[in-house]
Image (cartoon, rainbow, N blue to C red):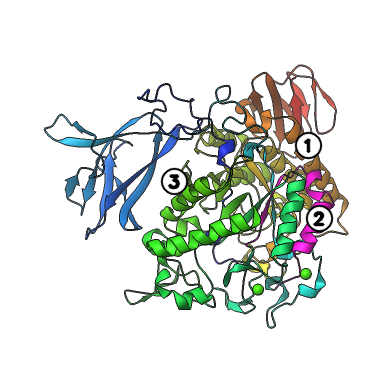
Amino acid sequence: MLLRSSILWPMLGLVSALGCGAGSSDNSTGGGGAGGAPPCTPIGSTCALSFSFPLSNESSVELRGDFAAGAWEQGVPMEIDAGSWRVTIQAPAGEVVRYKFFVNGKDWVLDPANPNVEDDGLGSQNSVKTVECANPICEEGEGGQGAGVAPGAFDWRSAVLYFVFVDRFKNGDVTNDNPVAGVDAPANYQGGDYAGLLETIESGYFEELGVNALWLTVPMDNPNIIGPGADGRAYSAYHGYWPSDLLKVEEHFGDMALLKQVIAAAHDRGIKVLFDYAMNHVHESNPLFTEQPGYFWSLDFEGRYCVCGDGCSWDGYEGRRCWFRDYLPDWNFQSAEARAASIDNAMWWIKETGVDGYRLDAIKHIETVWVEDLRKRVNAEVDQTQGRFYMVGETFETGNRDVIRQYVGEDLLDGQFDFPLRGAVVENILRRQGTMFDLDNFLATNDTYYPGLMSTFIGNHDIPRVIQTALDSPWGTWDNGGDSNWNNPPGQPPNRSPYERLSLGFTFIFTTPGVPLVYYGDEIGLAGSGDPDNRRFMQWEGTNTHQQWLNEQIKKLGAIRKERTELWAGKRSTVFVGNDVYAYRMTQGAKSTVIVLNRGDLPAEVDNLPADSSDALTGAPVAGPKATIPARTAWILSEN
Ligand SMILES: [Ca+2]
Ligand SMILES: [Ca+2]
Ligand SMILES: [Ca+2]
């Protein structure tokens, strides 16, 4: 069930692969402080800077200062989180920020927790802080590839992630299928399980795609009951987001022994595993809700029935304390006891299973201190010498990148899913709206926007199947599919063009930095409308020739990305832009590759290409600087 897009954030734990200055917590980055020379020049224009103000009975607190234009006049509202007013901003590394708290809309107050002050030249004082990145991502050539990563450890920048929606992926054991009576098939358990996943891992399926990391559905036990959706339909917990027993594996999927076998089989093949971890809420049948009612927000909030989007807002403080549905009690992480209990559980799954990271669900709807506390526990208790414990979150924000960025940092998430990038790629490449100049303009700021390792994607389980946006008459970028998620679901496109456009989208995310995500089924261009039609059972047989062609393209992309490290560890620069064509170069030291994309339905001329190269996808020679690229085609041209 799609409670709300924001219900499904993952976190993976990948920071060490990024870091160039492990342990560089001396505040000296870019600032030349007492700790000596800065460890590196951080990639990304900004680092996270957190502020807190003790909560008593203020009606509002704003952070005001010189961290942004006009921020002395209009500051950033702080929000109550775990007993304090808090806010995190992003500012350039090394920059000195002068600030005060603006309390109750009238009082200017120095930061009581910060002894560093400076005269403001007007007879008063400001608090002063220097922006630091304790564990920044380094510019190429300073930290270099894998800097901060122990020899032989996994470098998360090289990851290609595949989302295994367990119930819909592969049925390896029909004895555990057990659908819930009274629920229609699209919203019911359909039989996928760990036995089927294990078979698939052992078949080499993921390695053929170049996939070296799996994101698995929440493994915790969910109840076998009907939950009414916001649309009034009956849903089951096939998605895993209604945890009723935090220490037990979902029996539709298997048991703990089998889950451990899955992880061991993946590790044997060099494949990392991430769990989806749902920490925003539990199901009301979870005994914890009865035994520890104080761990959860009351459904009653000042006389209001605090369901998100109903009696309460999805945003801000109410968005963190509202219940997604009236049978999903919401954790109150302002309670230190509740927070510790939840994080104990997250740590238990890590230690019990050896999982390599988390996709953290519904980040915007929990208190941020939960993420900070988990990161601290992981750093203190989990052996990360073989690779960072990667934590990736989901914030379903398509326009406001700051909302996504505020949770990314060395003490928080390693990265998030890059929704705005997805929007640009789908709009400009797949839907052929605007021009490639729009994509270039977007990337000019997006390339270095986030202080972490983002996950790039074009499809996921909360939006209609991405191929619907690549049709000759495409659906909207974030279309919810209207009624067709239940009625008149779309069929598989019968012509080649949509698959070719989809291949262009995959080419982009496989040839640029970030962790590209493949949502199961997108590698064969599976059709589908919104939730739950976007979660049809994986098609293992009877694919058409176009689906097979797309699948072969993605296998090639996976192999090329693995071989050419500049595609994920290098820096991007623009080579040529036209209305329908886009060419860019990925450079890492002496290595470089030029990628050319033609979204148009006609051949297009491109300039500035290498004089003498060949396309890694087909082996065909390409002679620059001018060349004509066929319609709906990508070239990957190595220059050395
Ligand atoms: Ca089964
Ligand atoms: Ca169950
Ligand atoms: Ca919440």
Q: Which residues are magenta?
A: 189-218
* Residue 112 percent across, percent down from the top left: 22, 45
* Residue 429 percent across, percent down from the top left: 66, 41
* Residue 87 percent across, percent down from the top left: 35, 48
Spot the residue most to the left. 123
Asked if the stretch drawn in magenta spans residue 451, the answer is no
Q: Is residue 495 left or right of residue 576?
A: right
For disc 3, the neighbor class at 10 Å (few under 14, some 14 to 19, many from 20) is many
Q: Is residue 301 left or right of residue 23?
A: left
Residue 305 in sight: yes
Residue at disc 2, secondary structure: helix
What amino acid type is highlighted by mark number 1? Ala
Residue at disc 1, secondary structure: helix
CA gap between label 3 and label 2 equals 37 Å
Task: Tell me the residue at 68%/45% (across/down).
Answer: 430
What amino acid type is highlighted by mark number 2? Thr
* Disc number for residue 406: 3
- Give the residue pinned by disc 1: 559
For disc 1, the neighbor class at 10 Å (few under 14, some 14 to 19, many from 20) is some
Eyeballing the image, is 594 above or below 66?
above
- Give the residue pinned by disc 2: 200
